[in-house]
Image (spheres, rainbow, N blue to C red):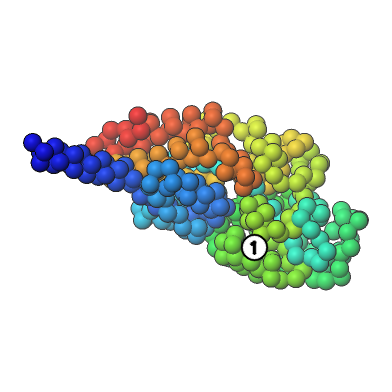
Amino acid sequence: MKLTKLFTATFAAAAVTLAGVAAATDITGAGATFPFPIYAKWAEDYKKATGASMNYQSIGSGAGIRQIQAKTVDFGASDAPLSKEQLDKDGLIQFPAIIGGVVPVVNVEGIGPGQMRFTGPLLADIYLGKVKMWNDAAITALNPTLKLPAEPITVVRRSDGSGTTFLWVDYLAKVSPEWKSKVGVGTAVSWPEGVGGKGNEGVAAYVQRIKGSIGYVEYAYAKKNKMAHAAVRNRDGNFVQPDDKTFQAAAASADWGKVPGMGIVLTDQPGKDAYPITGASFIMMHKAQANADKGMAVMKFFDWAFANGDKAALDLEYVPMPDSVVALIRNVWRAEIKGPNGQAIWK
């Protein structure tokens, strides 16, 4: 009798352990560097809470799209939303996961975070190579209280296909007809000027190292590295500092449910407090999941993040997705993502 009880107890304990292992399905994702700081934090917190790992490769939006197309990861990430035609072609769905902002950062002696001001047309002219010196009249007119040196500007931009680049050049194209006609919009463009760094990390490293440089990075990178970001004049004519409140102001009027694939681009939005280079980062998954457990694990991770990750997002100056948008996302999961048997995975 005692042996039977011991066997039963041991079997029960083993069953609990195995159930725990089964529940903790690990997943992989790859893509945009823009949201990497918050995805890394969410992954850390999620593993503590559930035991499951989310391994994310911060390799750029272009590479993330290619990896999900090739089915080498469980989800891809891009700050440049895919069109309905692109999604349909590859059998994908996409949904926004987080909102943040791209900021100009400078390495000019004596200039601290938030002290310098730019307009969109001026940023375009710098990246077109038309404004080449820090003491150019176009810069000093916006910054009369700053001591700007008679030194050349070194332009730093991305070398890889990048959603951060997409947001940057999409904004420049909206405020500069010359940029729109000569360079255009994309995750990769033919740059008229500058040296290239790989990822937000690479651009941040170059700007920190090169005296007299200007670059663009997601705000969390600027904040983490104590870089001198700048205020940018918005559509309403106000110079706005980047933070979670000004990113939220830019997203306030977005109607996610009316755009195919929820692919809203938030640059140059109206509103007195709207930061003009705001954007969402998107997750892409295959509609037909060969492994239902993996598909469910991806949705469980983001569902957990939407429910529990707001504080971490705000601490890193991102904007969490509103509850109404999260409800739309769950509806997309329920309607679109199917297992091998053709049945919905998300109930």
Q: How many marks?
A: 1
Say which quarter of the image contains residue 246: top right
**Percent x, y of residue 69:** 39, 52
At 81% from the left and 61% from the top, the residue drawn is 111
**Percent x, y of residue 345:** 32, 35
Which quadrant is the C terminus positioned in? top left
At 80% from the left and 45% from the top, the residue drawn is 239
Residue at label 1?
204
Q: Say left or right for 103 vs 280.
A: right
- Depth check: give the residue in front, 49 or 216: 49
- Farthest left residue in view: 1
At 75% from the left and 37% from the top, the residue drawn is 273
Residue 147 visible in the shown view: yes
Which quadrant is the N terminus positioned in? top left
Q: Say left or right for 303 vs 168.
A: left
- Depth check: give the residue in front, 14 or 279: 14
Q: How busy is the neighbourhood of tag 1: few (under 14 within 10 Å), some, or many (20 plus)?
A: many
**Percent x, y of residue 299:** 40, 39
At 85% from the left and 58% from the top, the residue drawn is 139
Secondary structure at numbered mark 1: helix
Q: For the residue marked with disc 1, what is the amino acid? A: Ala
Say which quarter of the image contains residue 337: top left
- Depth check: give the residue in front, 174 or 148: 148
The relative height of residue 299 versus residue 163 in the rendered view (above or below) is above
- Farthest front residue in view: 2
